[in-house]
Structure formats: structure tokens, C-alpha cells
Amino acid sequence: MSDPDPATPSAPRGGDWVRRHHPVTRLWHWTNVFVVTVMLMSGLMIFNAHPRLYWGHYGANAKGHPDPAWLDLSHINNGVPFPGAVTIPSTYSLADARLWHFAFAWVLVAGLALYLGWSLIGGHLRRDLAPRAAELAPAHLWHDIRQHARLRFPTGAAALHYNVLQKLAYGGVLLMLLPGVILTGLTMSPALDAGIPWLVDLFGGRQSARSVHFLCAAGLVAFFVVHIAMVVLAGPINEVRSMLTGWYRLPSEPEEQS
């Protein structure tokens, strides 16, 4: 997606229909919606089996005195903090939850690897997601934060491109949160630890990896909630249509609306 020149008559304006999302982006987006939802729900069932988080190597398995938990939800709902309505399966089964979780984990790994490869080769990361130096200036960041807080979203040709807050959010998911849940998930697998022993040391122990895994998953949930709120506030029909079909109607400029 190239920057339109507003001085040329052919530059898109508010109200114009434009192609916004590449088919690869749309496919990866909707695949992730399904895969991450299944993994989060099965992950909550796995967490229900031991609703405590620790730092280090041993946690509750430490010899002598168990390590203290930094997060303990065992007092909620008789030790089952997440109800069946938000877990897979809906009734307690650690074995089934692990089957669901691990099966979809490989879909997540493959999808992320393919999408990152496509983004690097095609220039999507550099062109659309990498913030420019000027965008990272405190004044620019503060301006975008205030505009979003006032629900003033980009209009006209400016809506063709991600603003700096979107770039930071999407880049954080693509390059930090998703790789984080994958690497920490690998770290918690005893079979993979045998072949890749340095993963445990990378995260400071299996219990630390479990904590980071939980925090990355919580970050994905927070991103999802904010993302859905922004879609609703910006115009859900137009936003969802663009992610389904690729076609997007540019929001009209203020003077065009009057």
C-alpha cells in the first residue's frame, strides 16, 4: 500500500472505496481469531488444574519449602477460578484440555511462521508496521493518544495507513506476544526440553516460563478487548467488511460531512 499524493486528482478521498487488507492478512487474521480463542479457552482449563503462578524452576515442587506463588487464584470458586463457560472442555479434564491446546499450538506456530515470512519478503513489516522516527516522538505519540481518547479517528486518505498506536499494538502482538506464548509453551514441554535445553535457561526456569506464558496470553486478551472496542467505535460494518472482503470505504473528512 503506497502513500497517496493528496495533490493528485487520483488520490483517494473520504467516501471512496479502496482495497485495504491483503488476502494473506485477512486469512491469517481470521485463522488466528479461531486458533487463539481455542488456545485461550483450553489454556484456562489447564490453569484450573493448578491456579497458581511462580518464578524460578520448581514452584510447588521445590524440595523442603515450596516457592511462594506470585499469583494465587486457588481461593476462587473452590479452586476452579475459570468456569466451564469459558473453558475447553467445559467440564474438568486436564488431559482433553492439553490435547486441544497442543493440537492448535502447531497451527499457531505454522501460521505465525508463514505470515512473518510473507511480511518480511513482501515488505509488509517495513512498509506498514514499522513506526517512523517522527511517529515515535513524544509529541506525536501524545497527540495520537489524545485523538483516540476523544474518539477522533483518521479520515480520508489518512485512514489508509496504520497510525503509530496501531503499529505499536500490531507489532507488539506479531513480534512479542505471539512469539512469547510459543517459546514459553515450548519451554514447558519436557519432550522439547530434551532437544532444546537452553529454552529453560532463557526464561529462568519452567515455572518462570509458565508465568510469562500466562502474562503473554493476558496481553493478547487485553489487545483483543481494546481492538474490538476500537472496531465498534470506528464503525463495525466498514471495519469488519474490510477484513472479510478487503474493500473499505474511507471515512469522510469533517468538511465533507457538513
Image (cartoon, rainbow, N blue to C red):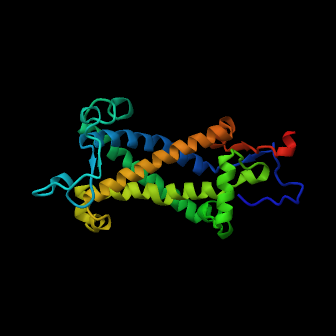
**241 to 127, vertically: above or below:** above
In the image: residue 91, left or right of residue 140? left
Q: Position of residue 239 (x, y in %)?
A: 66, 41
Q: Quadrant of residue 2?
A: bottom right
Q: Position of residue 21 (x, y in %)?
A: 65, 49
Q: Quadrant of residue 226?
A: top right
Q: Is residue 62 visible?
A: yes
Residue name at image x 52 percent, y 42 percent: 225
Q: Position of residue 221 (x, y in %)?
A: 46, 45
Count of marks placed on residues: 0
In the image: residue 65, left or right of residue 129? left
Residue name at image x 53 percent, y 48 percent: 28
Q: Is residue 162 visible?
A: no
Residue name at image x 59 percent, y 40 percent: 229
Q: Position of residue 132 (x, y in %)?
A: 66, 67
**159 to 128, vertically: above or below:** above
In the image: residue 85, left or right of residue 256? left
Question: 145 or 233, which lies in front?
Answer: 145
Q: Quadrant of the C terminus?
A: top right
Residue name at image x 70 percent, y 57 percent: 1
Question: 41 or 154, which lies in front?
Answer: 154
In the image: residue 216, left or right of residue 149? left
Question: Can you name the residue that lies furthest to the left here?
Answer: 64
